[in-house]
Image: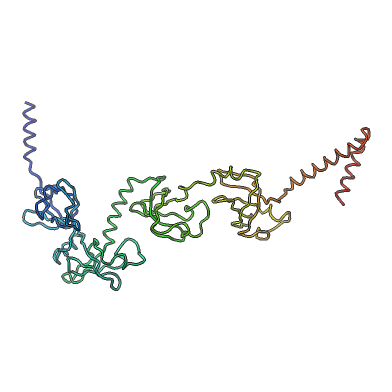
């Protein structure tokens, strides 16, 4: 009994007809190619009726068909023709004014040839002989230095943004298409990228505050502070537009379209070798790179600066600002007093600097040596009694 019910249900499901899908002009659909016959490609669009698209739209410049049965393609619904649903991958060179108007209302992409540069933008030929206008700002996502050299005589995909006077006044935008593609890539990257990832990018523009890099469809900013371990004053000294770089993703803020990148974190951190290269007590020669009220910063090597406190400048005399005794760019021989790797701080002193404590210790050592020599010359019985006299004699000597 149960087996009969199962068989009946299976037969019933086989007889359920496909529901007829309704499409709006310009609606984007994923369709499966079920057959190719001559100039027609038949599509399964998930409805009762088959879809059809002109095979010419899916051939390359040599006329070779770029798809096969079973492939899934993205198409736009154009119109109904009898029992057929007419789709297009994009309107091409044979499109007339009527089809271009359909494309305008449906938001369907159109192919055009950038024919000439005119005031404010470019003349674009659609449908073989229908003229349209594309402003400079709508030709691409980014400004280019030489628009004519970049765009003239190229075939591009546009969206019609204005269609008036029966097709005698048409305005198009390539940027609209590119932004949609960029948004699709952005959503894909949003699922893939994480903070801390190492990714490859391409420098797209340079600014005083840093460089923008395309990391696969979206731009991220490399702040000038993240360009190198050493101070960078001119971003153009490090990067050029079009340069390929590896970067670390520092922060992802998809809601505000802000991605922060770091180039310097792909480089060797010089502080990891600071203890080896600049051990405490060693002497080094560096360059004064910055003066502050509290002291002078001395660069010891790429990315490693140390501080000479103002109290250690002036050769013993009190000064109000380091500029009184040193200047930026000046070379200075210094002694490494201490290193704090965690805080990335190195305390320095001029190589000829003598601290008050060191001076007192030196005087004490000198006096001890003097006493020992004097005691050797004195008689044993007189050694303790003559200590005061020795001290007095030493003090008198220092006054001279």
Image height of 197 relative to 4, above or below: below
Q: Position of residue 27 (x, y in %)?
A: 18, 55
Q: Left or right of 273: which side holds 309?
A: right
Q: Position of residue 280 (x, y in %)?
A: 64, 43
Image height of 6 relative to 351, above or below: above
Q: Position of residue 89 (x, y in %)?
A: 18, 56
User: Residue 377's quadrant in the figure?
Assistant: top right
Q: Position of residue 243 (x, y in %)?
A: 40, 56
Q: Left or right of 274: which side holds 380?
A: right
Which of 19 and 202 lies nearest the eye of the viewer?
A: 202
User: Residue 138's quadrant in the figure?
Assistant: bottom left
User: Residue 124's quadrant in the figure?
Assistant: bottom left
Q: Left or right of 310: which side holds 8?
A: left
Q: How is the image coloured?
A: rainbow
Name the quadrant of the N terminus. Answer: top left
Image height of 240 relative to 44, above or below: below
Which residue does the image show at 28% across and 52% down from the upper left? Answer: 184
Which of 189 and 71 lies nearest the eye of the viewer?
A: 71
Residue at the extreme top of the image, as rendered: 1
């Amino acid at each position: 009994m149960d087996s009969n019910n199962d068989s009946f249900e299976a037969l019933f499901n086989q007889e359920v007809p496909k529901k007829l899908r309704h499409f709006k002009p310009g609606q984007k659909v994923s369709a499966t190619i079920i057959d190719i016959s001559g100039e027609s490609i038949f599509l399964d669009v998930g409805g009762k009726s088959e879809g059809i698209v002109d095979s010419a739209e899916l051939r390359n410049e040599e006329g070779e068909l770029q798809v096969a049965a079973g492939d899934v393609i993205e198409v736009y619904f154009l119109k109904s023709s009898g029992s057929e649903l007419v789709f297009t991958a994009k309107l091409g060179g044979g499109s007339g004014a009527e089809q271009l108007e359909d494309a305008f209302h449906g938001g369907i992409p159109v192919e055009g040839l950038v024919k000439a540069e005119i005031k404010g933008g470019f003349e674009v030929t659609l449908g073989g002989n229908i003229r349209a206008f594309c402003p400079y700002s709508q030709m691409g996502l980014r400004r280019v230095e030489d628009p004519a050299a970049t765009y003239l005589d190229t075939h591009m995909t546009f969206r019609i943004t204005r269609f008036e006077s029966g097709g005698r006044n048409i305005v198009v935008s390539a940027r609209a298409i590119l932004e949609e593609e960029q948004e699709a890539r952005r959503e894909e990257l949003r699922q893939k990228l994480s903070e801390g990832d190492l990714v490859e990018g391409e420098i797209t523009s340079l600014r005083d505050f840093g460089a923008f890099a395309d990391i696969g469809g979206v731009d991220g900013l490399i702040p000038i502070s993240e360009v190198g371990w050493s101070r960078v004053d001119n971003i153009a000294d490090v990067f050029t537009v079009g340069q390929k770089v590896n970067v670390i993703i520092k922060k992802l803020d998809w809601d505000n379209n802000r991605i922060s990148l770091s180039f310097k974190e792909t480089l060797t951190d010089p502080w990891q070798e600071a203890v080896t290269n600049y051990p405490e007590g060693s002497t080094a020669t560096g360059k004064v790179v910055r003066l502050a009220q509290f002291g002078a910063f001395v660069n010891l090597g790429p990315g490693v600066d140390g501080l000479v406190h103002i109290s250690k400048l002036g050769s013993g005399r009190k000064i109000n600002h380091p500029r009184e005794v040193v200047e930026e760019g000046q070379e200075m021989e210094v002694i490494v007093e201490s290193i704090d790797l965690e805080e990335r701080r190195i305390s320095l002193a001029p190589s000829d600097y003598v601290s008050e404590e060191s001076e007192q210790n030196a005087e004490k050592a000198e006096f001890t040596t003097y006493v020992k020599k004097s005691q050797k010359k004195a008689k044993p019985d007189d050694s303790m009694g003559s200590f005061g006299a020795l001290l007095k004699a030493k003090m008198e000597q220092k006054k001279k």
